[in-house]
Image (spheres, rainbow, N blue to C red):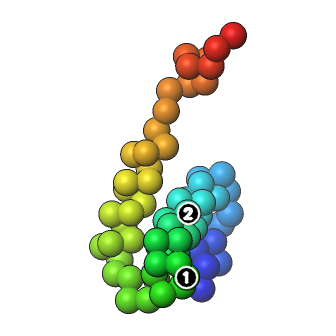
Amino acid sequence: MGYLAMKDRIDDETLRQGIIVATALASFCVEAFGVDGVAGLSREVMIERMQKLMALIKVEEPTKWMSK
């Protein structure tokens, strides 16, 4: 079952969480060249990948780094 289907409500926060879950899952598929990358995937490994992804995408406001 998909992440959003498991949630009671769909709002901005839930959508952001769904994006993180989907991106992390997709990264395992790319890593193993197919869905074999998610076979036997543990919750702990998934959480670790999501934490790494979230740390990777933290950036300052665009006004601080986009050239004018």
Q: Is residue 12 depicted above or below 57 in this figure?
A: below
Q: List x then y, in percent, for residue 26.
A: 55, 70
Q: CA separation, marks 1 and 2? A: 14 Å
Q: Residue at x 65, y 66 (%)?
A: 9
State the SS at label 2.
helix
**Going from the N terminus, do you reach mark 1 or mark 2 first?**
2
Q: List x then y, in percent, for residue 62.
A: 60, 24
* Image quadrant where residue 16 sits: bottom right
Mark 1, other Cα within 10 Å: few <14 / some 14–19 / many ≥20: few
Q: Residue at x 55, y 16 (%)?
A: 64
Q: Nearer the viewer, residue 13 or 22?
A: 22
State the SS at label 1.
loop
Q: Residue at x 56, y 25 (%)?
A: 61
Q: Are marks 1 and 2 in contact (CB under 8 Å)?
A: no
Q: Could you tell whether 7 is left or right of 57 in the image?
A: right
- Amino acid under disc 1: Gly
Q: Nearer the viewer, residue 19 or 65?
A: 65
Residue 23 disc label: 2
Q: Is residue 65 depicted above or below 25 in this figure?
A: above
* Image quadrant where residue 6 sits: bottom right
Q: List x then y, in percent, for residue 3.
A: 58, 74
The answer to whether residue 8 of the structure is visible from this angle is: no
For disc 1, the marked residue is 34
